Amino acid sequence: MRDRLNFKNKVVVITGASSGIGKACGYVFAAMGAKVVLAARRENELKIIENEIKQKGEDCLSVRTDVRNVEDCKNLIDKTIEKYNKIDVLINNAGISMRANFEELDLSVIKELMDTNFYGTVYCTKFALPFLIKQKGTVIGISSIAGLTPLPGRTGYAASKHAIDGFLNTLRLENPKRGLHVLIVHPGFTTSNIRKLALNKNGKPQKNSPRDEARMMPAHKVALIIARAAHIREKDLTLTLEGKIVVWLYKNFPGITDRIILHEMSKEPSATFL
């Protein structure tokens, strides 16, 4: 797939690029000829990735960015334009998760999820939009199956992903004749640190994954699929066979699917919603 796709001289901005899907997108798009701009809070990890990409003869810039901060998001876009003078693709990937029943949840956790997942997407898209429209470019939102279905124990996460879907679907309809391409990606469970860094009821990282990471779709494979979808300008991606089945079932048989989701998620350690 990589050999058939070409992003030569395209400028691709990726948030949450220090790990998981964002990191994989950095390597994949750079290998396809793109000039990649990596953004995340963890500057040391960004620099390592930037150096590895440059050692392969590919073009890369890293910008420390906390997407919860509107000025950081503006700075990310300003630095990109300063160096490359355009933006062709913006991948809004920065995100965090949580695991706790809402009844026990500190409200600050909901705010943290919305500030990072939803407002981070809004801020970066706002500042990049004029440049994306000029290039007839692509804005991508990394949502989740939880943006299409409920997910017990993750009220804040599901809410933020539903919000991303509503925002980007509406943004697409606001720009029908300006050449703006909007792609929303709904991964299923993917190999990454997101579950280990998921916040508990008090807003602290849980430091362990409740699921078998070996069974997850590799982040590199997700990145390749995203690149192809961006290339052919798809509107929506739902990833993994299991994810597609759950989404279809929920649209057509929501009551039955609720029970399936509850049964599956109740297998996680410390699940208390059954």
Image (tube, grey):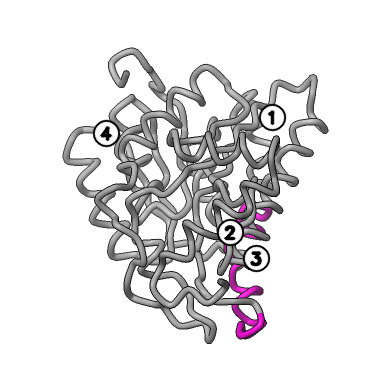
CA–CA distance in space, label 4 to label 1: 26 Å
Percent across and percent down for residue 121 are 62, 52
For the C terminus, the image quarter is bottom right
Distance CA(mark 1)–CA(mark 2): 34 Å
Instruction: Check residue 114 in the rendering and tell me which mark sits there, or answer none.
Output: 3
Image marks 2 and 4: residues in contact by CB distance under 8 Å = no
Q: Which residue is mark 1?
A: 133
Location of mark 4 (residue): 58
Image point 32% across, 18% down: which residue?
Answer: 1
* Kind of residue at badge 3: Met
Q: CA distance from mark 3 to mark 4?
A: 34 Å
Q: For the view shown, which residue lies furthest in the right direction?
A: 174
Q: CA distance from mark 3 to mark 1?
A: 26 Å
Distance between the alpha carbons at the discs numbered 2 and 3: 16 Å
Which element type, helix, strand or loop, lies under badge 1?
helix
Say few, some or many: other residues with alpha carbon within 10 Å of mark 2 (under 14 / 14 to 19 / 20 or more). some
> Which of the two discs, 2 and 3, labels the residue nearer the N terminus?
3
The image quarter containing residue 185 is: top right
Residue 109, how many percent across, how many down? 59, 78
